[in-house]
Amino acid sequence: MATYTDPLIIRKLLDSSHTLAVVGLSSRRHRAGYYVPAYLQKMGYRIIPVNPSLDNALGEKAYAKLTEIPEPVDLVLVFRRSEAVPAIVEQAIEINAKAIWMQVGIANQQAAERAREAGLDVVMDACMMVEHRKRG
């Protein structure tokens, strides 16, 4: 079984990703789906919310699906249940995202393998905010 927390891939993604589509971005400030993207936005990443229940979040227009985003996306950050990940991976492939990152507690081995086969970098079961803070 492949590992999906490779420190070299994590560093590469933190350094090279600029536009992040956040699937499952929450409007509830106490949830990781809100405060993690808010932190990343403060650190200079462009955040595009993806949540069919929101019109906008963090000062940005929200989209119902990845395929509705009208601009290139570097990385898809996932805050959805593990069983929802395969469909998200398919949309990420369709929009030519370069990577998919599943937050802590989110893991789907088959979806991760599908993403890798399509040429995407994959991080699974790791917090992007924590990893960003670690790098100093």
Image: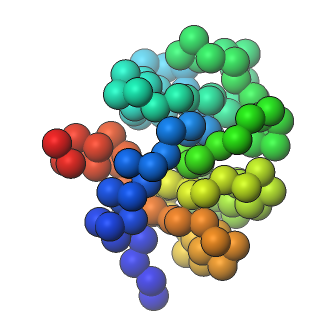
Residue 38 to residue 125: above or below: above
View extreme (bottom): residue? 1
Decide if residue 76 is on the left or right side of residue 40.
Answer: right
Q: Which residue is painted at 39% across and 58% down in the image?
A: 12
Decide if residue 93 is on the left or right side of residue 79.
Answer: right
Residue 12 to residue 44: above or below: below
Q: How many marks?
A: 0
In the rendered image, is residue 89 in sight? yes
Measured from the top left, where is residue 106 in percent x and y? 48, 57
Q: Which residue is painted at 49% across and 46% down in the image?
A: 17
Q: Which residue is painted at 32% across and 67% down in the image?
A: 8
Measured from the top left, where is residue 53 in percent x and y? 72, 24
Decide if residue 52 is on the left or right side of residue 123.
Answer: right
Q: Where's the N terminus, which quadrant?
A: bottom left
Residue 32 to residue 56: above or below: below
Question: Image quarter for residue 111?
Answer: bottom right
Q: How is the image coloured?
A: rainbow
Q: Which residue is painted at 45% across and 49% down in the image?
A: 16
In the rendered image, is residue 103 in sight? no
Question: Image quarter for residue 7?
Answer: bottom left
Residue 78 to residue 37: above or below: below
View extreme (front): residue? 16
In-front residue for pair 122/72: 72
Measured from the top left, where is residue 110 in percent x and y? 62, 76
Q: Where's the C terminus, which quadrant?
A: top left
Measured from the top left, where is residue 135 in percent x and y? 21, 48
